Each structure stands twice: as C-alpha cells, then as structure tokens.
Amino acid sequence: MKVAVVGTGYVGLVTGTCFAEVGMDITCIDIDQKKIDNLKQGILPIYEPGLEEMVTRNVAAGRLHFTTDIAEGVKDADVAFIAVGTPPGEDGSADLKYVLAVARGIGENLTDYCVVVTKSTVPVGTAAKVHNELTQALAKRNSSIEFDVASNPEFLKEGAAIDDFLKPDRIVVGVSSERAQDVMSKLYKPFLLNGHPIIFMDIPSAEMTKYAANSMLATKISFMNDIANLCEIMGADVNMVRKGIGSDARIGTKFIYPGIGYGGSCFPKDVKALIKTAAENGYQMQVLKAVESVNEAQKEVLFDKVKKHFGGELQGRKFALWGLSFKPKTDDMREAPSLVIIEKLLAHGCTVSVYDPVAVPEAKHSLGDTVTYAKDQFEALVDADALLVITEWPEFRSPSFGVVGKLLKQKVIFDGRNIYDPQEMQEAGFAYHCIGIRTAHQEPAQVSA
Ligand code: UDX
C-alpha cells in the first residue's frame, strides 16, 4: 500500500515509520524544510526510544521518504493521514486551522481514490469539516476523483510509542463507507497479529472515543490523587489502598498511581477540550471539571510539603530537582508539574539546581537561566537543602543514599512519585516526604472544618 502522512510531529512520525517497518511505501510530508532535511539524515525532532534507528533503517531500505511537497506525497496514495497539530486556542478548544489546510492541500493534489484519515486528536465533527474542504478543493479542479474520510484516533504513549503502535490494545476507526473500511482493514492487518481487535464505528463515535479514553485515564489519576491526600490526613497508606483496589479487575492496576499531577500534551488538553465542547453544546461535564481542578492543585502539593517542612522559611534556600519532563523516557515539557514547582520555589526566593537525563534542552525554552543545570544527578545535590524527585526516571530509583546524604546540606527528600521505601529512608536517616503515606517526618495535613 502507498501511504501519505502529513505532519512529522510525534504522532505522524511514529505512524509513518511503523507503517514503513511492516513493508509499506510511506511518504511523510511537512512544511518545515529543515525538519525534513534533518529527517532524511536520521536527525529527529523529538526523543522517543528506538525511533531514530527505525527511521534510519527504513529510509535506507527505500520504504520511508520525507518531502515538503504534498503533491509528491499524495500522488497515488491509497491512504492519506492528517497528523498535524491542533494547538489549544485561548479558550481551550482545539484550533483546526492546520488540519483543514492540510485537507485542502490533499484535495488539490489527489490523483485517485483515497481514504483521508484524521489521526490528530480532533473534536467531534472535524471529519465532516475535512470532507467539506476536500469536496471544495476537488470542485475547484473540476475533478471527479472519489474519496472517503475516516477518523483513526491514536492511543500512543510517549516513551512507549513504537511498542504501542506495533502491538496495539485496539485500533479504533470511524468510517462511513464499506470501501473505506476495506482499505483500513488491509492497512492495519499487519498490526493485529497479537489478537487485539480493530473496532469499526461511525465517525463521530471514533472522534469521541479518543476524548473519552484520555478523560477516563485522567479521572483515574485525579481520583487517586484525591484518595492519596486523604490517606495522609487519615493515616492510611495509599500504596496499600492502591494494591487493595487494583486487584479488583473491574478497577485494574494501571493508572492508579498517585503523584504530582498528570501533564503532557494529551490529558490536560483533551480534558479541557471535552469540557469546552460539552459546554458549547449546553452540557456541563461536572466530573471532568473536578478532575481538572484536582490536577491543578496536585501540581502544588510537593511545594506545599516543602514549605511546611521548613516552617515557611524558604528565602535563600537551595533545592535540587531530579527530573523535569512530565514523565520518564520523554523530553516533553508540556504541562510538566516541574514547571509549577520551580515557579513557586523561585517566587519564594529559592535557588534551584536541576538534572534530567534528556529534557534539559526542551526545558531551557521555558526556564532559561532561572535555574542551574547540573551535569549529573549528584552535582545537582551539592549544598541543597533538600532533594525533590519530580520524574521517576529509572536512574533515580536506586541511588547511593550514602552519597546523596553527604552531598545534601540537610538529609531531606520530597518524593513526588513514591519511588523510595519510607522505612528504608527512615533507617538511612532521611526526613522523607512522599504522596499519600504518612511517614515519620510527614505530619498529617490539617483537616479543615
Ligand atoms: C497519554 C495516553 O496514555 C495515550 O493513550 C494518549 O494517546 C496520549 O496521552 P502520554 O501523555 O504519553 O499518553 O502519557 P501517559 O503515560 O499516559 O502519562 C500521562 C500522565 O499521567 C503523566 O504525567 C504521568 O506521570 C501521569 N500518571 C500516569 C500518573 O500520575 N499516575 C498514573 O498512574 C499514570
């Protein structure tokens, strides 16, 4: 099959490369000439484990092509994916200008029947707008080329995107014709060998599925963060509670880890967008509004613990942060809780020394020189009043606590991801604060009346 993928961001690049990996002829298109030139040489605009090797291998094999010329990419394509960004507008709704411009571009260059698929996360009703753009573009050419639109939401997790794409839990496709369904079945056949299904449905339902999935996962996290905060107050241990509820298959063990709030490019944006879409249509998403406000508050929980530990006296103190990205194995800083925590520390007259294995270049865009960037995790600790664990990178899980204790000015750790054992920390002489577990040094929060 010949496939065009427009947009070489995260989703487009992973999609195109994984289709090439199973032997298809793929052209990835982007308007950014520099990005395309770099990709041809195997230089990627994002960090994703394993992706660079896969791009290089498939370019060398002649299956994966990069171009800025949409006409070249769309020529003879059986399927054209739209995988460009939908940045949130000021009011939180997804801005569709790039998606619709690409739809027009595809319509201006189609050479034969093609299924035009929205892969970006787009509000319910977008495929209909894409259809409209294509119809108009073809009418201008007096062309009678047939096409279908389809919606194929993406469920990739950053840091595990290749595995998620090659071995998906499910593939969701919204279609409105049997012809499009046949093309999409053929396209995804190589990815269904693990026995998981491709689920066909109508287009609005497919568009809604993406928002419902991300909103449900965000809800699990905010719910668990609420429970964790209450555990601390009541003297319960959220790790025990998590195991206790997770073993009920109806609840499940995943996405019930408390922490310092969800971040990234999907959950915050999609939760906001769904609340907005609902409100525009006269419906209030009450659960999701609470999910969002719990998440905003949770990003401040670790800072509140710091403030409390030092009796409100933060001026002039130095803090070491391990981890900046919103989660491990990515350099993505979008909506990262680290940014909120750093802003609060700086506003209270503290200095901050940070270390992250990959996210520093990204972080510099927003943090500039307001913090110091340590060359390794231990350098960050020198003379700091405490260590704050922000992102659970594997290399932070088992440091030499003897060394950590010697480098820090005070043996204090605030662990936003619950990666250490409270008992062990106590034995090693650390004042240890974490999320949802009342430790020897962590007084219960005040119960307000
Ligand atoms: C998410 C969805 O998982 C994916 O299906 C969708 O396509 C895009 O959005 P991603 O944003 O890459 O993927 O990250 P994910 O691993 O899902 O984590 C999201 C956030 O939730 C992170 O900030 C993470 O730290 C947080 N999280 C996750 C928790 O706080 N607790 C958990 O138990 C799980």
Image (cartoon, helix red, strand yellow):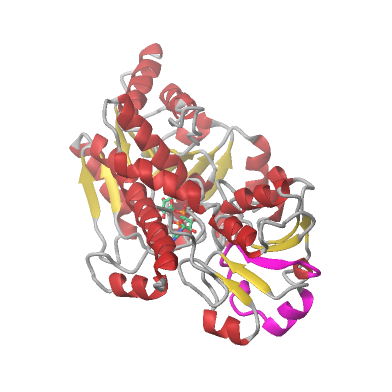
Q: Nearer the viewer, residue 437 or 39?
A: 437
Q: What residue is rendered at 40% in x and 52% in y?
A: 449
Q: Where residue 24 appears, x then y in whole percent?
A: 42, 51
Residue lying furthest left? 178
Query: Viewed as shown, does residue 10 lie left or right of 307?
Result: left
Q: Quadrant of residue 125?
A: top left
Q: What residue is rendered at 28% in x and 74% in y?
A: 247
Q: Is residue 149 above or below residue 49?
A: above
Q: What residue is rendered at 33% in x and 69% in y?
A: 253
Query: Viewed as shown, does residue 4 lie left or right of 364?
Result: left
Q: Nearer the viewer, residue 195 or 224?
A: 224
Q: Where residue 404 appears, x then y in whole percent?
A: 72, 77
Q: Is residue 392 above or below residue 90?
A: below
Q: Quadrant of residue 165?
A: bottom left
Residue 238 at least partly seen: yes
Figure quarter occupied by ligand 1: bottom left
* Total marks placed: 0
Q: Is residue 393 above or below residue 154?
A: below
Q: Nearer the viewer, residue 440 or 218?
A: 440
Q: Nearer the viewer, residue 191 or 380?
A: 380
* 306 part of magenta stretch: no
Query: Viewed as shown, does residue 152 lie left or right of 66?
Result: left
Q: Where residue 230 appears, x then y in whole percent?
A: 40, 62
Residue lying furthest bottom? 427
What stretch of residues is rendered in magenta? 382-407
* 398 part of magenta stretch: yes
Q: What residue is rendered at 53% in x and 52% in y?
A: 299
Query: Viewed as shown, does residue 323 lie left or right of 378?
Result: left
Q: Where residue 387 appears, x then y in whole percent?
A: 68, 68
Residue 120 at least partly seen: no
